[in-house]
Image: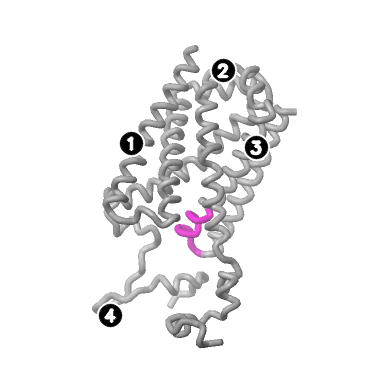
Amino acid sequence: MAHNPDAREALMIGTRTDGTTVRRPLSPHLQVYDMLQMSSATSISHRITGSAWSVGLVFFVWWILALAAGPESYARAQWFFGSFIGVIVLFGLSVAVWYHTLNGVRHLVWDAGYGYDIPTTYRTGWMVIIGTGVMTVLTWIVGIIAWAS
Amino acid sequence: MSEHIPAVNRQTSMQTGLGRVRGSGSARNGTHHWWMQRVTSVALLPLTIWFVFSIAAHAGDPWEVMAEWIGRPFNAVLMILLIGITFHHTEAGLQVVIEDYIRPERRAMVAGLVIKAICLVAALLSALAVIRLAV
């Protein structure tokens, strides 16, 4: 057997019923679940939106540093966020932040021990999806009114 | 002593009584990481809602207005809280993602430390920017 520096690899070897060995899939098993069903889709979306927001923090840091640096650098940052690409980035981040926030509440409810049955999972999943749409639209209505005034 | 322990526990657990009370295994670390992710998420709930709508309401505002708004004591304190807790939560979340997908363990550890460093520097830079606007 080839040398492997990771002791956890020993746990990744499984046996099929016919005796042949198989490499167990890594969490969260994207290749074995139907990613379009509510439970899997909302789960992986939580991770994707969290990662997206982590990348989005780069824009946040740029924005706050530009603000502290003075009017000229802030004007440059504002030019970017007002540009076509900037608006797309901000829109994507607003969707990500609302989804991750609302689905985060769903996770906290699960952590408290409620809402594990399938009908409730689907109901709360739809609430998160619709809530994300509503909050994103609301955010942009506030933003566009502020922009126009 | 042993008759006070339920028969089920006596048979299924090899853990000592002290180990059970401490709630941690051989890693010498229990649920702290998991728990802090929940604590920070609860704190971020009001802070994020406040931040997103405040920034949306200031869309297109010139530097003078924005700098003055961030510089107000209450806003500056909430901003610093938001920055600190956001980067803590981000670091904790990214660490779990790294642990799940990156192999071997050595590389995952290096990636985790790099994320920790980036989050710490970014948080301090952002906080310093807020303090500069506030004082």
Label 4 with label 3: CB-CB less than 8 Å: no
Residue B128 against residue B12 in the figure, above or below:
above
Q: Earlier in the sequence, mark 4 or mark 1?
A: 4
Residue A130: give its label: 1
Q: Are marks 4 and 1 on the same chain?
A: yes
Chain letter for mark 4: A
Range shown magenta = B95-104
Depth order, front residue of B84/B72 = B72
Query: Same chain, marks 2 and 1?
Result: no
Q: Residues within 10 Å of mark 1 (few under 14, many from 20)?
A: few
Q: Position of residue A116 (x, y in %)?
A: 34, 56
Residues at marks 1 and 3, CA–CA distance in whole angstroms: 31 Å
SS label for mark 4: loop
Q: Are marks 3 and 2 on the same chain?
A: yes
- At label 2, the amino acid type is Asp
Residue A4 part of the magenta-drawn span: no
Q: Residue at x 59, y 44 (%)?
A: B85
Query: What predominant SS class does the magenta segment belong to?
Result: helix
Front-most of residues A1 and B107: B107
Magenta highlight on residue B99:
yes
- Mark 1 residue type: Ile
What is the secondary structure assignment of the residue under circle 1? Answer: helix
Q: Give the CA separation, mark 4 to mark 1.
A: 47 Å
Which quarter of the rendering shows the C terminus of chain B? top right
